[in-house]
Amino acid sequence: MISGTVIIAAEICKGCELCIASCPQESLGLSTSINRNGYRYATLLKNNCTGCVNCALVCPDSAITVYREIKSAKRSSQSSQPAATQAA
């Protein structure tokens, strides 16, 4: 089973909502806070991210980094690795 998480650079995000629309798990949404540029920024709302990287690929500002955590049934240890450093 693969799970993931995203880190969003709030000060870079302009709240375009492309990442929200591209998330098949509906994990993302807009924050209630605003950044220093006056935008509501994207944030992880649900802990059901699969690490698919759709959000990072569509982000026009490269504000999203996705991390995947691979859970193996045979091993008890978990490894975490970046799935996509930042969208280009």
Image (tube, rainbow, N blue to C red):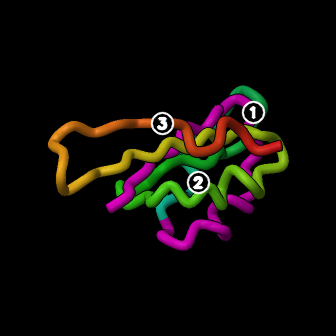
Q: In this view, does 23 lie to the left or right of 68?
A: right
Secondary structure beneath dot 3 equals: strand
Instruction: Residue 87: give x, y in percent of width and height.
Output: 76, 44
Q: Marks 2 and 3: CB-CB under 8 Å?
A: no
> Given the current orientation, which residue lies at the most extreme front position?
74
Q: In this view, does 88 lie above or below 58?
A: above
In the image, which is nearer the foreground, mark 2 or mark 3? 3
Q: Residue 41's image quarter?
A: top right
Q: Name the residue under label 1.
A: 12
User: Mark 2 or mark 3, which has the lower sequence index?
Assistant: 2
Mark 3 residue crowding within 10 angstroms, few (<14) / some (14–19) / many (20+): few
Secondary structure beneath dot 1 equals: loop
Magenta residues span 1-26
What is the number of callouts on the image?
3
Q: Mark 3 points at which residue?
A: 81
Mark 2 residue crowding within 10 angstroms, few (<14) / some (14–19) / many (20+): some
Q: Name the residue under label 2.
A: 30
Q: Which residue is drawn at 74% across and 62% down?
A: 18
Q: Residue 30's image quarter?
A: bottom right
Q: Nearer the viewer, residue 41 or 83?
A: 83
Does the magenta-highlighted stretch encompass residue 27?
A: no
Q: Is residue 46 left or right of residue 7?
A: left
User: Mark 2 or mark 1, which has the lower sequence index?
Assistant: 1
Q: Which residue is drawn at 35% across and 37% down?
A: 79
What amino acid does circle 3 point to? Answer: Gln
Instruction: Residue 80: give x, y in percent of width and height.
Output: 40, 36
Does the magenta-highlighted stretch encompass residue 14?
A: yes
| Distance of label 3 from label 1 (alpha carbons) | 23 Å
Q: Residue at x 15, y 42 (%)?
A: 76
What amino acid does circle 1 point to? Answer: Ile
